[in-house]
Amino acid sequence: LGAMRGARAEAWLREGAAAGDANSMAVLGTLCSRHELPGGEAVAFEWWRQAAALGDVSAQLRLALALLGGGVGEEKEEQPSTGGGASAPPTAAGAASAGRREEAVRWLRRAEAGGSKKAHEALAALGEESLRAPSATEVLRGAALRGSADAMSDLGLVLAGASRSGNGSAGGGEVAAGVAG
């Protein structure tokens, strides 16, 4: 942020955060994590926790990834570590890590419930079972990618907003029956 613009932006973001705006809190956390505002990781975590508690999905995801050590502030392409490896005697650090992982999984589940595909992927990488059932479109897409001609046709119809019966209601009629069966 430029000095003058940054000061004005920060003032407005802080005003929004004080008024309870989760997005302002999430942005403040990201700016702190990037050292564009003072406070660093510790302050970033607090902003993200506040925003996450208010339901901000991006803050839930960023907080979870940061708790897992996946990089504070930036959503990295790498998947979080599953923590596997040689067994060692439990330590205070190990117990703290386990607590951070549990908290991260809780935030990932909330972000996944809010529609975050990255949270869904992170849970899978951690070996955690997803609580979200795949949508009919996801089921069709998977079958189409595996070569099912019927699924390819049905997926095309669903994405076009049509159905095999021609009534224009995606997800109804024979398309839905093919997915359910």
Image (cartoon, rainbow, N blue to C red):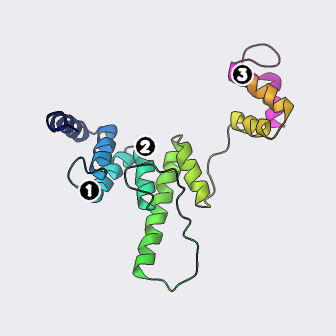
Q: Is residue 170 rendered magenta in the image? A: yes
- Give left or right: position of 125 versus 37: right
Instruction: Kindly identify the residue that appears in the image at 84 percent across and 37 percent down.
Output: 181
Q: What residue would you read off at disc 1? A: 40
Instruction: Kindly identify the residue that appears in the image at 68 percent across and 37 percent down.
Output: 135
Residue 37 horizontal/vertical position (percent): 22, 48
The numbered disc on residue 170 is 3
Q: What residue would you read off at disc 2? A: 58
- Give left or right: position of 69 versus 48: right
Instruction: Kindly identify the residue that appears in the image at 82 percent across and 16 percent down.
Output: 165
Magenta-drawn segment: 157-181
> In this rendering, which labeled residue sits more in front, label 3 or label 1?
1
Type of amino acid under label 3: Ala
Name the quadrant of the N terminus: top left
Type of amino acid under label 1: Gly
Q: Residue furthest top?
A: 167
As helix, strand or loop, the secondary structure at mark 3 comes to loop
In primary-sequence order, the first of circles 1 and 2 is 1
Residue 88 horizontal/vertical position (percent): 53, 84
| Looking at the image, residue 58 lies above or below residue 162 | below
Q: Is residue 37 rendered magenta in the image? A: no
